[in-house]
Image (spheres, helix red, strand yellow):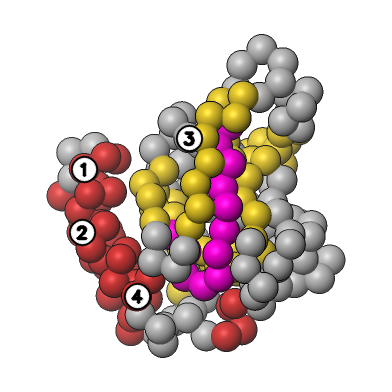
Amino acid sequence: MADEFVLDTPVVRAFVADVRGAIDASSSPEDACERIRPRFAALLADDDWLPAAYQEPVPDSGMGGGIGQWLLFRAGDGSLSLFALVVPPGSQTPVHDHLAWGLVGLYRGDQDEEIYAAGDGALRLAGTRALVPGDFYALLPPRDDIHRVRTTSAVASVSVHLLTNDTGCVWRHAYDPETGSVRDFRSGYVNVRCVDDGGI
Ligand SMILES: [Fe+2]
């Protein structure tokens, strides 16, 4: 499989090239995230690079709640993806994991995030954080890998994810936080198919 630049612009190509350079030069995921931080901050601060079409909620999406997961780039070998997650006002994601390290930040709107720790039975709420545009964090599983995000603004929130898997197409997990029950979960993307969807 070849790399897929769904949003094929000089900004995205330069960003991905810089990210790959940082990963190649790094000694660990933590180190890579540190090296990528300035580039990721600049992307979140750039008002022009993400077209409005990728900031739209999607009624009847696979994520539910009108949530749109828009792929922007993915590596041909499944080792990297860049996508926008659009959560309408008042909507929230299921409690879910990601199974890959990377950086996640807010581009538009406001979000509240609940972070959970798995244990025996019910999940434990391990922390919360409020995010405003420009805020971002390094995701380094298993630490803080299970969470739920909710939009608190009157407009849809748009978060930018740079993760080291093909997040929309890998099987991961959704949780019932009260019971701790787990189901296999694949979010998909609204604008591209997964290779093993039976599609082309
Ligand atoms: Fe997430």
* Residue at left offset 40%, top offset 83%: 47
Q: How far apart are marks 3 and 2 (CA)?
A: 26 Å
Q: Name the disc covering residue 21, or none.
A: 2
Where is residue 12? Give x, y as percent. 37, 76
N-term mark: 4 or 2: 2
Q: Name the disc covering residue 112, or none.
A: none
Q: Indicate whether 185 appears above or below 20.
A: above
Q: Label 4: state its secondary structure.
A: helix
Q: Distance between the residues labelled 1 and 2?
A: 12 Å
**Stretch of the chain drawn in magenta:** 105-116
Amino acid type, label 1: Asp
Q: Nearer the viewer, mark 1 or mark 2?
A: 1
Q: Which quadrant of the figure has residue 16?
A: bottom left
N-term mark: 1 or 4: 1
Q: Label 3: state its secondary structure.
A: loop
Q: Distance between the residues labelled 1 and 4?
A: 22 Å
Q: Name the disc covering residue 144, or none.
A: 3
* Residue at left offset 70%, top offset 67%: 89
* Residue at left offset 64%, top offset 41%: 96
Where is residue 137? Give x, y as percent. 38, 50
